[in-house]
Amino acid sequence: MSRFRMRTAAVPALATAAVMLMCSCSAGAGSPAADGKEDGGTAVKSGARLTATLGTAKDSQGPAPVVPGARTGGTVKIANLNDYSHLDPQKIYAGESYSTSLLWGRQLTQYQVVDGKPKLVGDLATDTGQSSDGGRTWTYKLKDGIAWEDGQPITSAHVKYGIERTFGPGFELGPTYWPEWLTGSEDRTAAVKKYGGPKDGDLDAIETPDDRTIVFHFPRPQSDVPYMAAQSSSSPVRKDKDTGTDYDVRPFATGPYRIAEHKQNQSLTLERNPRWKPETDPIRHQYADRFEFTFGKKILNTAQEVLGGRGAGADTVTTKNEVPPELYAEARRDAKKRELLVPGSQGAYTSDLYIKNNRVTDPEVRKAIHYLFPREQARQVLGGPRLGDFATTLSSPAVVGWKKYDLYPVAPSGDIAKAKEHLAKAKDKVTTLTYAYESDAPEKDRLAQVLVDAFGKAGIKLVTKPMDKAAFNDQVFRGDAPYDLWISTNSVDWPTPSTLLPDSYHSKLDALANSIRYSNPEVDKELERIAGIGDAQQKAAALIGLEQVVMKDVPVVPFLYTSVTQFRGANVGGAAIHPIYGSIAAVDLYLKKS
Amino acid sequence: MAEVHSGGPPKAPSRGPFATACRAFRRDRTGMAALVVVALCALLALAAPLLAALYGKNPKEHYGQNRPGLLSAEGLPVLPNGGISGEHWFGIEPGLGRDVLTQLLYGMRTSLLVALASVTVIAVVGIVLGVTVGYLSGLADRAFTFVCNVMLAFPTLLLLLALSPVIQTRFVDPGENEPVWMQFTSLILVFSAFGWVPLAMVLRTAVRGLRERDFVEAARAVGAGRRHIVFRELLPNVWAPVLVHITLAVPGIVTAEAALSFLGVGINEPVPDWGRMISRGSEVFYDDPTYMVFPGVAILVFVLAFNLLGDAVRDALDPRIAA
Amino acid sequence: MTAYLLRRVAQAAAVLLAITAVAFGLFYAAPSDPALIACGPKCDTAQVAAVRHSMGLDQPVLTQFADYLRGLVGGRTIADVDGSPIDCAAPCLGYSYTLHQPVLDAIGDRFPVTLSVAAGALVVIVVLGVGAGFVSALRRGTVTDRLLSGFTLVGASVQIYFLGYALQYLLVYTTDILPVPGWTPFADDPAAWAAGLALPWLVLGFVNAAVFARLSRSQMLETMHEGYVRTARGKGLGPLRAHLKYTARGAAAPLVQLLGLEAGALFGGAFITETVFGLGGVGKLAVDAVVQNDLPTVVGTVLLAAFSVVLFVALADLAVAWLDPRVRLA
């Protein structure tokens, strides 16, 4: 057999290599931006973070304020990497899904955003709710003219049925507040023993004296019902349309759009809901004819089309994904592309370094971690200032009543000398700590290396534990949880402090809630006292006051008030990061030209 | 990869077959050049610590993060062309700011170590199984063919992808870093588990051909045992296909290892790895294309050299060409 | 011939059964618990146990495997996370709790992408590979031969991901010659379909063409000197016609076999190519499933890939028998 020979093979190979080397000349990040307007900093200053106020009954009346420049017609294309894992309103439990589901779903209350300022107003209800009996009873009146997509009116029984569903099996995924509050239970498991969902018949704690009135009776005072009433769990569901698991794929609409077709993991098409009346709705518009969601396309490719205006890019936007890091720096340099970036603070999300307090028991060691934590380097390796501003407080500036404090000031790059001082004061010498992380993205591996470096400088060997998502959830939150540190990004469930300390820092809570195993008897006592306060403002003030007591113990190390940078096509109007939900609000989108 | 080699035993030569092959090989200029490149790679990998010390950098330190002025706040090199400077000859890694040149050198150690170790295991397993089955035939042969068919139909890359984390997470204590040797061992085992198949199949065919030949018959006639026949008569005559196979297997494993790292499994941080460098390069591809070029071209040259070497070895060992 | 066919089918079935067993065993031995993923981070231990039970994960592996095989043949009913039944018709490859759909549907949704990528790439492979090989053989020893040979060697040595990104940078990002790679259904817009897949085709084709070029060149050179071709030329047939009529046909058998292997691999999903270009085909599905520990999908895609290889290798064998009279007679 004659063999293949190539004496000259090296020539094309070298040529290829040479061409590649030539093409690879690139400008450094130090070169000035084309238009010289590089501001280089974060797009979102903490000052721009606004807290939600409560609106009046008048604010709750429709129609929503007209958006200047908005046009009617056309199809807004939304290209997200992944489909929604849940559309069932009582299963939705994530900021962006809340925001997007406003297109077809309505709740008792909702946030109206005008000029970026959120205000909680009545949505299906005429106002944000009337409380009596020291916060034990809350009454809502439904508006006139609200209807389902088949024209039937929405009644108080539908709202009640929706909330009853949250008790049922399979609805553990959603928020647990309704079951806990309505039964006066510590957790959902205890609550569902008293009432197990619609299969157990009527829930006595919710009264519907007539079709338009709904009255909640709570065993204990509740101050945050208006905010809970805005959650997706507070959406009405009609018994005759409740298709069980299929409802998770195609819910029945009450909002300005209805689901025309949902091909799972491929597309979701919305069309106008003719039964929706703008005069009943203070929040939503119906500018575009259709919304077409597509799933599965790589975000890098979507972003190239959108930022470059190729193909259908001009009419396209993403609500779930951020500008890929690959394109970010270039988009900031190019004035045209920079206009298409949509930066904003990510609701009330904060990112923190969590410390397992029952493993790292000595506060001096936790203080040392606070000082050595390389915030600057960590943020740099994750992508830089666009990720958010450095945090010094436990709660986000987006929370009602937030006050800035900085108990242990430290330079963003960390202070190794100070950390060593505190380590020297520790009763037991700490030489090794473990850091667990979800290794779903390579930058997480690099972040781990940054931490290893910083801990190493302070004389601590940091053991890194990459895990897949399931293992992470299982091993960090359940069972023995043999890890000391992890970084997590979390948000309160609504912009008051009520779901922060009471839901995570009471020593009686289980490891899923109080994942750091924080335990301070004084804090417990104070939390129990605060739980009895029925007035929202007093409660918020007390909790904000307590936060500094907690943070004196350094149970966690604040890292970032997180920001996001998303992108929109040149023809897409109304794209802004929702101040509560932290992503582009689909419900505000329209096409500039159709 | 499964190149069926039809080279039979060398014809009764006046000089030794090895000497003939060497002479043929030496006349092959491309082959010699490839050998030089391969040898150079091996040398660079061996001498990496020495070179790094002379150059004054190491692959683990985060230069860009600890020295101001090298990386921007977003983590991109401040200097053009990936931060190439007199200090960092090949630039610095975006994000962590490690030195690219030392990463490349140490990355070659990773690639070569995995490849050479796997090839050794593959050669041993492949020879033992291939020669044995070729000699035994019958039921063993049928079972062997079936197993080979199953192995060959498996989507290897997907399996490697799925298996590496399984092996890695099984045996590590929660309070310890995953030992580097364990990462290497699991990779090597996974590559070996699939790599022996083509070699064993080639050898089986070769041995079956030899079995009926005069010199084996003769040995059998004079009452030589099985052991003697396998080790003394058969084995010495199949080293040519083995040599060709393992030379060509090295670049195959290097690329497979890089592909695994590219897809996110394989050797973990902070051990330098070419595949991971390329993967990182693909993330910063539009702002810092330089970073991807170094590992990309390094793998290209490395694999090209090994492929050329493999061709040259095959040509030199093929009696019809070497004549 | 019928007996031969039957034996082949039986062999293929045995191979597939073995692969199913091995894949099932390997992945269900994985340390990760799919019930945890299905249930979500807020589940407590009791809920996880309930989900594990409704997913059947508390059964012995052998029982699970038997259920799986039964479903494959006759379909079965699978329990959802909350215990409600999901109907999964034969051939049932299981139900993905991550994607919330039967695995077969998930594969079916993505198969058009894989099919398009594979078919286009095969065309490029054959045209480029066999073309280069034949030209090389006909012009043996010339500069053309050497350049082509060198070029294909680079193809054999370059990495798909490296070349993919480099070409995307050059052809899409800096020069705008091609659109951003992506998937448009053929029925929607054939031009956009082809344009979006052009780069993957090119890269896959170039990288895989090398083996074909080498093989077709050596096959050509070998058959060129065989008796019947020389006879044909001696009878006055022109060189080109002689080569096309006899040499190509004679050289085709090993090429067809190689093509069968290649097609089998491609139709099972091009993992790296789909990842590099962000195409949502079966390959991407498989890689994602591995990353997300979506075991039913992993096993399903492994089976599909194996089935594809077995099928195309068998087809290639049949084609060879048809092409080469020597094989048929033997």
Image (spheres, grey):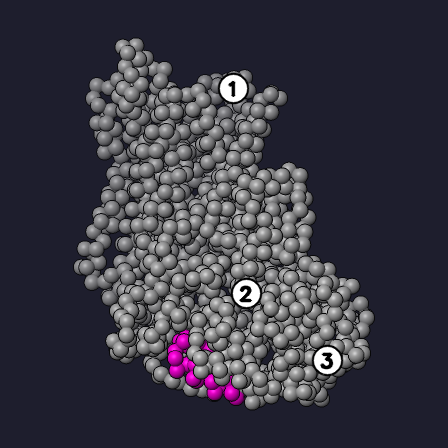
A542, above or below A154, in the image: below
In space, the residues marked 2 and 3 are separated at their CA atoms by 29 Å
**Whether residue C275 can be seen here:** no
Q: Amino acid at mark 1?
A: Arg
User: Does B142 sit left or right of A449 as displayed?
Assistant: right
Q: Amino acid at mark 3?
A: Val
User: Disc 2 is attached to a residue of which chain?
Assistant: C
Q: Position of residue C216 (x, y in %)?
A: 45, 32
User: Does A76 sit left or right of C46 as displayed?
Assistant: right
Q: Is residue A543 magenta?
A: yes
In space, the residues marked 1 and 2 are separated at their CA atoms by 67 Å
Q: Residues within 10 Å of mark 1 (few under 14, many from 20)?
A: few
Q: Are marks 2 and 3 in contact (CB under 8 Å)?
A: no
Q: Residue at x 73, y 60 (%)?
A: A243
What residue is disc 1 on?
C326
User: Disc 3 is attached to a residue of which chain?
Assistant: A
Q: Position of residue A496 (x, y in %)?
A: 56, 82
Q: Which residues are magenta?
A: A541-563
The label number, if any, that marks residue A215 in the structure image: 3
Q: Residue at x 57, y 24 (%)?
A: C7
Q: Position of residue B174 (x, y in %)?
A: 37, 58
Question: Which marked residue is nearer to the observer: mark 1 or mark 2?
Answer: 2
Q: Quadrant of residue B242?
A: top left
**Whether residue B178 can be seen here:** yes
User: Does C31 sit left or right of A266 as displayed?
Assistant: left
Q: Are marks 1 and 2 in contact (CB under 8 Å)?
A: no
Q: Position of residue A169 (x, y in %)?
A: 64, 62
Q: Earlier in the sequence, mark 1 or mark 2?
A: 2
